[in-house]
């Protein structure tokens, strides 16, 4: 099992549920996500870029959705509140969509319903990640991190996790996590050409998974062995 970003939490929870059903997990890899931390909102707020308006993932205000699109694309918000004056709700949404297409953030063929279905999905994932309560994984957890972070993110991780190279995952694994660092950013590690490096590392880990320790026992492969990657 492996997962990138929010998908890492899905893979982690799938592994937990499979273990509770008596299944053995040969490989559990979480890709470029730090461990859950309870009551971390105050710390996150201190390191947030104050020049950017805070995105409220629970808001249906069109301007908040515009800011969310910009955040997902790693760009400044393309629409300001003055641009939306004099437009009704649906006209505001269409304007935001048109500006996003003009900037190349979303495909030209994407319609309003599809665009905001994607955004609703993102908001649901953010809420789920915020509320997720992780339990300890009984076995060795494999953790991958990208090596490109902003100065704010580095400082935030230092405050939350100290010098822990697993960025908190050591608290959620019964054995010391196996930590790997990949060249690239959060998004580029899953795109060409960096994704080929990730694929080779995962392949090597799968080939050696029969010898990986699992709690107090050794992993024995099942009939349905394979790798499920979630994103």
Image (spheres, rainbow, N blue to C red):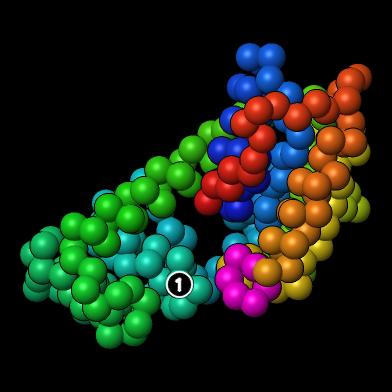
Image-quadrant location for residue 224: top right
Q: Is residue 116 above or below residue 93?
A: above
Please identify the quarter of the rendering in which residue 79 is found.
bottom left
- Identify whether 173 is placed above or below 215: below
Quadrant of the snapshot with the N terminus: top right
Q: Nearer the viewer, residue 225 or 73?
A: 225
User: Mark 1 = which residue?
Assistant: 73
**Residue occupying the point 56% across, 38% down:** 10
Q: Position of residue 69 (x, y in %)?
A: 37, 67
Q: Nearer the viewer, residue 26 or 107?
A: 26
Q: Residue at x 60, y 65 (%)?
A: 190
The residue most toward the bottom is 102
Q: Residues within 10 Å of mark 1 (few under 14, many from 20)?
A: some
Is residue 181 on the magenta stretch? no
In the figure, is residue 9 to the left or right of 120? right
Q: Secondary structure at mark 1?
A: helix
Q: Which residues are magenta?
A: 189-195
């Amino acid at each position: 099992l492996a997962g990138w970003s929010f998908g890492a939490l899905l893979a982690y929870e799938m592994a937990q549920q499979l273990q509770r059903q008596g299944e053995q997990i040969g490989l559990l890899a979480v890709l470029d996500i730090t461990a859950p931390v309870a009551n971390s909102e105050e710390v996150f707020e201190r390191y947030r870029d104050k020049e950017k308006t805070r995105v409220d993932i629970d808001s249906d205000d069109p301007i908040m959705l515009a800011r969310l699109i910009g955040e997902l694309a790693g760009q400044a918000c393309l629409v300001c509140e003055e641009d939306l004056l004099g437009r009704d709700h649906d006209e505001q949404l269409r304007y935001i969509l048109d500006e996003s297409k003009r900037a190349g953030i979303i495909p030209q063929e994407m319609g309003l319903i599809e665009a905001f279905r994607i955004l609703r999905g993102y908001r649901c994932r953010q809420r789920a990640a915020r509320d997720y309560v992780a339990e300890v994984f009984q076995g060795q957890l494999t953790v991958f991190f990208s090596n490109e972070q902003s100065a704010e993110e580095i400082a935030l991780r230092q405050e939350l996790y100290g010098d822990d190279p697993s960025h908190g995952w050591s608290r959620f694994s019964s054995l010391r996590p196996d930590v790997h660092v990949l060249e690239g950013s959060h998004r580029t590690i899953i795109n060409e050409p960096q994704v080929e490096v990730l694929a080779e590392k995962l392949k090597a880990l799968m080939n050696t998974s029969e010898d990986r320790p699992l709690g107090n026992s050794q992993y024995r492969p099942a009939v349905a062995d394979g790798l499920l990657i979630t994103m």
